[in-house]
Amino acid sequence: MTAAVVEVRDLVKTYRETNALDGVSFTLQENKLYGLLGRNGAGKTTVMSILTGQGFETSGHVSVFDRHPYENQSVLSRMCFIRESQKYPDDFTPGNAFRAASMFLHNWDGALCQQLIKDFELPTNRKIKKLSRGQLSAVGVIIGLASRAELTFFDEPYLGLDAVARQIFYDRLLADYSKFPRTIVLSSHLIDEVANLLEHVIVLDHGQVLMDADTDDVRGSAFTVIGKRGLVEDFIAGREVIHRDAFTAFASVTVQGALSDLERREANELGLEIAPVSLQQLIVRRTTRHAEDEFGGQIKPELEEVR
Ligand SMILES: Nc1ncnc2c1ncn2[C@@H]1O[C@H](COP(=O)(O)OP(=O)(O)OP(=O)(O)O)[C@@H](O)[C@H]1O
């Protein structure tokens, strides 16, 4: 049986005029790889800041390793928070940053750190403030991976990393996680890119939890029917529609639920195409629909990326 590493109940964070978190509840289990997803301003960084003791909730319950993390060294030493806006002392080199991290993080793996320095071709003696944006991100990614912390948060760690470097990050993350299971939370806008890594997704929207489910369940929870408009509409009658693209003669409609073998055969006989829905499409569609519901249908369904 897995144990809960993080418990969040009815978490509220209010900044003067903004409700950044508005009653958020979820649990993170040990040894699981989570995606914390959502549009800009959804509240992802705010949650991670509170869980890593860098911020304080307005109300609600937060526990990490059964304790409140704020100024709690016994909790903080078991976790690592990698964020894009990480500040380092002015004269620090990556080498200095890695040495400092190795002193603070007691599961630190020096050999893995050296391997990752090579993988990312990182100049370790150059001042951090002189590094390119991608190299700066690599410093964070290396610390996050080599920390082997029991609980690691990566808040959009890839900014500036090119496609090759991002792939190196995903590959090393998965390989090391398989050998040394731990709880990892990855916040990302590049949902399709990270979808295959994630075992469970939590989607925030306007400070609320919109989705909290295992990735496989999410993927199997909807499908798209494409074909002649009348046939599509008849076929999906009675199902909950998540998204609809209708043209004069054709329609592409994404609906909630799964299809039986019989229904699949029926669709085939009618000449309808049944397409799976990617995690990104599903999240974009749910997020857009949530916004429509909240704002009384004032928002057009736009298929923009979640960011
Ligand atoms: N220090 C602050 N003062 C006032 N408002 C804040 C502060 N920090 C965050 N907010 C607001 O709280 C909300 C949630 O912000 P947060 O940074 O948690 O979102 P996010 O999901 O991480 O967004 P992004 O994907 O753009 O990084 C936003 O509306 C943001 O403007």
Image (cartoon, rainbow, N blue to C red):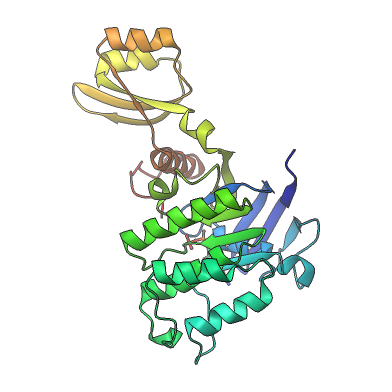
Can residue 195 be seen in the rendering of this structure?
yes
Q: Position of residue 238 (x, y in %)?
A: 45, 15
Q: Is residue 70 left or right of residue 301?
A: right
Name, please, the residue furthest toward the front. Answer: 111
Quadrant position of the N terminus in the picture: top right
Q: Residue at x 54, y 81 (%)?
A: 97
Q: Is residue 270 left or right of residue 171?
A: left
Can residue 19 be seen in the rendering of this structure?
no
Q: Residue at x 51, y 45 (%)?
A: 198
Q: In this view, does 139 lie to the left or right of 19?
A: left
Q: Position of residue 274 (x, y in %)?
A: 33, 21
Can you tell which quarter of the image residue 252 is in?
Answer: top left
Nearest the viewer among 198 and 143 is: 143
- For residue 199, above or below residue 167: above
Name, please, the residue furthest toward the left. Answer: 248
Can you tell which quarter of the image residue 75 is in?
Answer: bottom right
Can you tell which quarter of the image residue 15 is in?
Answer: bottom right
Q: Position of residue 169 (x, y in %)?
A: 43, 59
Nearest the viewer among 136 and 116 is: 116
Q: How many tags in the picture?
A: 0
- For residue 134, above or below residue 264: below
Q: Where is residue 120 in the image (x, y as percent from the top left)?
A: 39, 69
- For residue 109, above or below residue 239: below
Quadrant position of the C terminus in the picture: bottom left
Q: Residue at x 37, y 72 (%)?
A: 121
